[in-house]
Image (cartoon, rainbow, N blue to C red):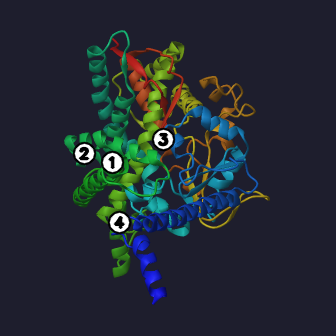
Amino acid sequence: MMASIANASFASPLADASYPGGLLSRVYNGVNGLGLFVMFLLMLLAYDQFIYVWNKGSIVGPAWKMPFIGPFLQSMNPKMNDYKAKWATGDLSCISVFHKFVVIASSRDMARKVFNSPMFVKPCVVDVTHKLLRPTNWVFLDGKDHTDYRKDLDGLFTRQALDTYLPGQEEVYDKYFAEFLEISKQGDQKKGTPFMTVFRELMCAVSCRTFAGHYMSEAAVKKVVDDYWMITAALELVCFPIIIPFTKTWYGKKAADMFLEEFAKCAAKSKARMAVGGDITCIMDAWVKSMQDSAKYNQKIAKGLPVDPSEKPTTLIRDFSDFEISQTIFTFLFASQDATSSACTWLFQLIADRPEILDRVRAENLAARDGDKNVRFNMDLLENLPYTRAVVKETLRYRPPVIMVPYVVKKPFPVTDTYTAPKGAMIIPSCYPALHDPEVYPNPDYYDPERWITGDAESKSKNWLVFGTGPHYCIGQTYAQMNLIGMIGKASMLMDWKHIATSESEDIEGFATIFPRDHCPLIFSERP
């Protein structure tokens, strides 16, 4: 009985919350729970560090990483000097951001090895890209599936095919060059107008016309032009793994959905028009025509009808659904938009700062047209502008739009004899160092188009990583260069422009691709 009384008297004030002493029990239990949480958190931190150190192995990288997020905050505002410092640390280096371990291949040979190792790696861009382009997109296909799909697209970028797209491109240039003049007339005559965003709009409109022709209304093109910025902004979060409502990735996903729907409508219109013998005016037409020609040929063969060998299409391809066409056209826009916008911006700035180069481009283009600046584009003309071509190539070397291309490791990848990149890691071949190698391009930080004419730059194909290499090299590299050649040649004949240099003109801003940090303030004026 005494024992029970003692137990009762002990338990009541300490354990029962109705007594003041019961608070001690609450505090004790709270501290105990907090201790377990802290212990669990410390274990997670230790595991995070252990995995990083294990993956890092022998390559260069920070001795430890900021828990969980790594250098995420720095990646939100990347600086070119930070990239250069990272490349200078060694052929291979590493970082870890959120859940992703990242290996950076800096040297030319390391970069080429990644590009040319499809058994071990495949393109991944950044985490959100699969959600924007869709996981079923052809660019994420692997091995034979990717090779076969790509063969079906090769015919869209032949010389003959490219020639048919030129009228649509020049139509867009006519419109936007007039806008350049009006913007400058209304803008600040001393400070100029930052043209980077205008150039982005121009290149997006050119792409829409080249890829989908006039199946897109002016209003639809304007909508794509206005909203594509959200796609680029969505890529800023690099390794952030999820899409959160009302964030950049969320708005980017909504824009992507709209683009895919619009391009699918264009595909249906193209199929209807090409079925009744319409002329090819854009990439979508050329692709649909190849499908329909292949289908007709296969039907005759299946029925046992006699078929003249001349009727057999150069490449037999299957029918693609409207959505498959839409996905692919979207990847063309995705691959070209930021890169050509960057190249366009630097091109206008660089030759404005070097009037002797602009004068020479203008003279060459006028001579190729027998003095008539109104002569329209054609491939024969564009292919016979050697100096303009050299200016474009030097711009792409000096300020390569894409400075690195993320891949994902499919299985343990023996990059060197002493280091194997782990499965699931991101591995990034860098293009910039190879294009600024002083042993290959003497005085690499000097802008010199002449190196492509009287120099030996043209023979340095191993370092020419502007468009990548290997099985995933840029399928539209000829189109991109011809587009820039035609654009700057036409602009040189119709307009003069002045660059209002600032302290940030030569500083590089990273926004998917690279741009002048001051966004290229210019003043355009019409030539007589």
Residue occupied by mark 4:
320
Residue 313 sits in which quadrant? bottom left
Determine the CA span between mark 1 and mark 4. Answer: 17 Å
Determine whether the residue tagged by mark 1 lies in a helix, strand or loop.
Answer: loop
Determine the CA span between mark 1 and mark 2. Answer: 9 Å
Residue occupied by mark 2:
214
Query: Observer-nearest residue: 317 or 96?
Result: 96
**How crowded is the residue under tag 2: few (<14 C-alpha within 10 Å), some, or many (20+)?**
some
In-image side of 413 versus 349 (left or right): right
Whether pointer 1 and pointer 2 mark residues with C-beta atoms closer than 8 Å, the reply is yes
Q: Residue at x 31, y 17 (%)?
A: 184
Determine the CA span between mark 3 and mark 2. Answer: 38 Å
Query: Observer-nearest residue: 159 or 467?
Result: 467
Q: Is residue 401 above or below residue 347?
A: below
For the image, the number of numbered tags is 4
Determine whether the residue tagged by mark 2 lies in a helix, strand or loop.
Answer: helix
Residue occupied by mark 3:
76
- In this view of the protein, can residue 367 be seen by the observer? yes
Residue occupied by mark 1:
282
In-image side of 306 versus 420 (left or right): left
